[in-house]
Image (cartoon, rainbow, N blue to C red):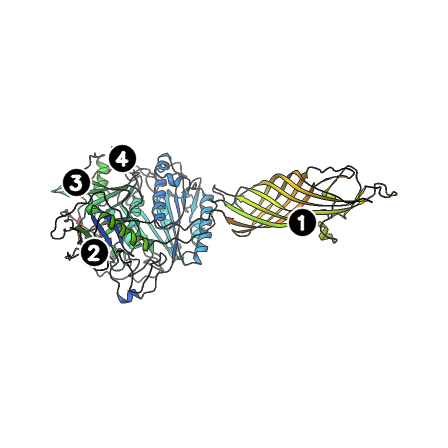
Amino acid sequence: MSAPRPTCSPSSSRPHRATPSCSRGHSWRGHVHSVVGGLLALVAPTQASASDQTATPAPHVERFALVIGNNSTSSPQQAPLRFADDDAARIAEVLREAGTDVELLTTFDRDSQQLFSGLVNQAQQPTTDAVKTAYRRLLSRMRQAKSRGQVELTIYYSGHGDVGPDGRAFLTLDGGRLTKHDLFSGMLAPSPADHNHLLIDACRSEALVLSRGKDWRPDRSSEDLSLGVRQFLERDQLASYPNTGVVLASSADQKTHEWEVYRGGIFTHQLVSGLRGAADLNGDGNVEYSEIGGFVSAANRGVSDPRGRLDVVVRAPAGNQRAALISHDDIGDERVALFVGSDVNHYVIEDHRGVRVADLRRGDAHPTYVRLPDGDIFITRQGQTAGRATRKEAKIDEGNTGAVVVQELAFASPQRASRGPLVDSLRAGLFRVGYGPSYYAGYTAQQNLLGIGEPDWEVRVWKRVDGELVEVTRVSGADGQPPVDSSGPPAGEFPDSEDCDCTDEQLARELESIDEDFDFDEDDDDDWSWDRAWGALSVGPVFTPFAPEGEIRLNPYRITSNQFSGVGDSRFQRAIRGGELRWWFFSAKGHSDYPGAEGYFRTGITQGSADFLPQDEDAPFATDEPVRLEYLTVPLFIGGNAYLFDRFPVRPFLGAGAGFDILRVDYTRHERSNLTDVSARIGFELHAGIDARITNYVGIVAEVRQLWSARRKLPHVPDFSNEGLTIVTAIKFGFPLHPRRGQVNRRSHRGSTRGQTTTVPPGPPMPAPPPVPPEPPVTAPGPVAPEPPVGTAPPVGPESPTPATTPAPNPADDPNSPTEAVEPE
């Protein structure tokens, strides 16, 4: 028996990606299912109220991002960064996994090319021209998407910030700079997005910690470079953009930092961790500004060295302070790591490449998820037992898709070594304080931020015992773990033993049938893309510039088409020689706006006629002499054009071609029958012209062409050659040969089973994992007199903050307690 299709309300049918909300906010729609070590983890939305069930579905939202990472510097006093390219790549990956259309601009070094090989061919050099060109492409796609619904834009930058001699701030690019004017007037002002999100990781040291024995080194010893970022985001400028929010970080030494252990900026790594879901406190699939702020603040609060403690600056859009930085609309169908129970260990997640996916530490018993990339995943658990630091690792195999309950994984002790006191100081401090509802309540009250909605969680875990499914764990909302009814899952939510004998094979088939009920295809997105092959058809008339009278003095040797008149008697008609049909092919795979070269195949029809005059004006035509000639040609030519530049829509070009003319001639002879002949004549052409693109799909072409064609020799008549100068004008219609699909195609996730399943004897339900003994307390931020304060700029625009109704933060971990936390290589 196939499991019934999960629904969002009694009257709902098949859920659609464009309506990511089934209950409050963007809840976990449908069911996440995965067999993990014999356990079936099922995540479902909490029961919606009657008002929720009748709520208007969320609008269709399409997300776009401009991601820039630049290691280079414009100042001789600044050392280049090492990991800005890695930062940009990790941001691009998490945004694309969530369905964002990303333009990536960075130059990968050799190590990063190996780690992010799939992005190398997609990345563009972060020059000023390339950044502006990439943004123009995004603008075109955003304007098309705006007609379909809402649009969100994210602009991320990782690199150096600076202030010029004139006191104006800028962000450095490869050989150029991104000025405040470029950002606000060139990008935010024309943006059609409903919300713009600016994420900036700038003004960092060249390397916070390199290896054992290395000391801290600043970006620049004589100047406070982060002043550039502060001025870059001055309040007066942002006040004009109420739909724009900003997240950035600075430290006590007014710089943000890289760390070799992360292979990236500390702030960017924490940002990626939060965007993957670790910051999503209420589990609605949306990561809001206040959640990112609270998550990064908690992650850094335990760092005792003021040089390394980051303060996050959060400015939510004044027009919507609960706007989401990222929305995991399809999280119910994705691969996630679930953290449940009272577990306050520090977890480190890495992928099969060794790239650090996320760090997190929960401060309460609230459930947490982290969206995982494909491939094998390695999770390290760091905690304390009897006052001693412990470290254990577990692996999630590539074949495990859907939800994986981390507490059910088999953790084992690794063999690792410490790297030195400065590294250990950061290891012990970062993610020392847990992030949970208590910390979040204190943080939002202190920062005067609008809080999130109520938690929207329901996590249930079943274990198969003697052929029946027994629920062993349930977490709902912000609660801990209420008593569990061991009678099994609610009726209709999963097949029971009477409908299914629950063998591994049949269980997998049931899970697959559930997934197939929700399998749907993305609509194709035919956005313009210069990185794809394009074709075009052009059609237009062929003219001669001479407008001849159509009378030729008989030449016994050779005549050319230049001397012939066109299709009619008027001057204009005599200039028309016919029409042309041309197929174009082009693909610009560089960083240009328009193609630098095009190939073509042309055909069509040209014709002409002329009356002959006798060679001797006083003598009549002799017998067999031609008195009139009419010709018709069908060209079959191939060739190409080279454009002189590729940054402007009106572009001159030069070109050449070769092929054959299918030539038909009809000589009218004096006192003899007509002489008619059809042949193929080889030809060659040179041309020059102008190509003007009106829109992405329509253009106008005009060219001057000189054609040379082999002459046709027939007895007793002059040789004819289709040689001449003509003018061609045409309208050009472009279309993609391989239209790009929607931004991220949905992957089909199937339930999977292990090769062996251990059967547990009958007995009471399995308890949830016991809580880890608490560590010495450290006070999380409270609404009054926090220490140290988090550096957040004052709010922009009118605000109506909601007073915090939750109690003050509970004590968390002590950053000063001795811990030797060691990271994986």
Instruction: Please tell me whether residue 558 is drawn above or below residue 735 in the rendered image.
Output: above
Q: Position of residue 618 (x, y in %)?
A: 88, 43
Judged left or right of residue 508, residue 62 is: right
Secondary structure under tag 2 reads loop
Q: Residues within 10 Å of mark 3 (few under 14, many from 20)?
A: some
Q: Which mark is residue 578?
A: 1
Camera-near label (4 vs 2) is 2
Q: Which mark is residue 215?
A: 4
Q: Position of residue 679 (x, y in %)?
A: 68, 40
**Sequence order check: which comes first, mark 3 or mark 2?**
3
Q: Position of residue 722 (x, y in %)?
A: 70, 41
Q: Position of residue 213 (x, y in %)?
A: 25, 32
Q: Which mark is residue 390?
A: 3
Q: Which mark is residue 753?
A: none
Residue 244, can we see it?
yes
Q: What whole-number distance in Å separates the C-alpha atoms at marks 4 and 2?
A: 62 Å
What's the residue type where badge 3 is placed? Thr
Return the residue found at the far right: 618
